[in-house]
Image (cartoon, rainbow, N blue to C red):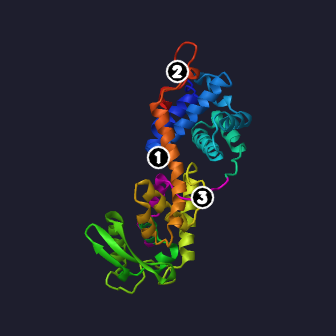
Amino acid sequence: MKNKKISFMDHLEYYFNIYLPTVKGLSKSTIVSYKATFRILMEFLYTVKGIPSDKVEFSTFDDKLIMEFLSWLETERSCSVSARNQRLSAIAAFSIYAQNRDFGSAVTFRNCALKVPKKKVPRKGRSSFTRDEVKTLFQLPDSSNEIGLRDKTLLCFMYASGTRAQEVCDLTVGDIQFYPDRAGINIHGKGQKVRRIGIPCDASNMLKKYIEHRRIINDTGRHVFSSQTHEKMSVACIEEIYSKYIDKAKLEYPEMFRYSYTPHSMRHTTATHMLEAGVPLIVVKNFLGHVSLQTTQIYTEITQDTMNKQLKSWNDKWFLKDNSHFENTNGKSNIPEFLR
């Protein structure tokens, strides 16, 4: 007896309900974003192509249809190039999964997704990591070995402190005072100016354990972070560390890390997340060691994007919309239950 052929929708349902949350371990917000892509795709197929969701198969798709869908996103739904590329990434990610599990049925679908190029995104403002990207980045180093432990500690410290790469290189054991719930740190910034900052308990504990692991806790003149060849780490070494893990992240998580990043991106990220958490601008200014408040205000432009997303989410959730175009003639919803 031949095995029953698994449909496109069966693969898609397993992908969202089991594979992404359990096997890949993706966050709820990332999965919600992926689902949104396929809800919109089902809307396009039904309203523009006249194909209800229960009739969608792998053979439904070719590169022309996918490109038409992406153009429709930009023209009819006023999506940005970045959002358009994000939808394409979600489709491409599913095509990889589907091909690995049902090569005969999904290989053409995968090839179609590969043929569609991403559009170049006009970069505005500064590259920074999302919260999910920060968490992912922290998980990549293998802390069971010396290099991985150093790299993980360095990444976490830079996020907690918002320090520049050179400031991390200059950090010595004597610059740090550990307390039960935090660490106080003297940061040697630009123009030989020293600022005093605090980092929270988790980051403080990680930093202390790393210094103790290196057995330099009492050597106040020793640099906290060293390279494999020098007692004091260089900026170039930190750049190599970031390049290593960002390349790895882009390979393992193609739906994330869509821009170019440098060690300074982590500093931008710290500032952005502090402002999003409601920390006053003047406090962020002093924490980062900015001379002018104008420099810090750059980050408010980034958080405006976040605010717009939050407002859109609020509008989508709480305001009634005409969903008649989602309905079939028999009155049933065109969107499968697992995508809602």
Residue 277: which quarter of the image?
bottom left
Residue 186: which quarter of the image?
bottom left
Instruction: Please give the name of the residue rendered at 54% of the width and 23% of the height, measured from the top-left corner.
Output: 323
Label 2 secondary element: loop
Three-letter amino acid code of the residue under disc 1: Leu
Is label 1 in contact with label 3 (beta carbons under 8 Å)? no
Label drawn at residue 54: none
Q: Nearer the viewer, mark 3 or mark 2?
A: 3
Q: Which residue is mark 1?
A: 26
Instruction: Please give the name of the residue rendered at 47% of the width and 52% of the height, measured from the top-left corner.
Output: 132
Q: Is residue 318 left or right of residue 247?
A: left
Q: Which residue is mark 3?
A: 125
Which numbered disc, 1 or 3, marks the residue that appears first in the sequence? 1
Label 1 secondary element: loop
Three-letter amino acid code of the residue under disc 2: Ser
Query: Which quarter of the figure is the N terminus placed in?
Result: top right
Q: Which stretch is magenta? A: 122-146
Three-letter amino acid code of the residue under disc 3: Gly
Residue 140 visible in the snapshot:
no
Q: Is residue 128 left or right of residue 115?
A: left
Circle 2 Cα neighbour tier, 10 Å, few/some/many (<14 / 14–19 / ≥20): some
Q: Which residue is mark 2?
A: 333
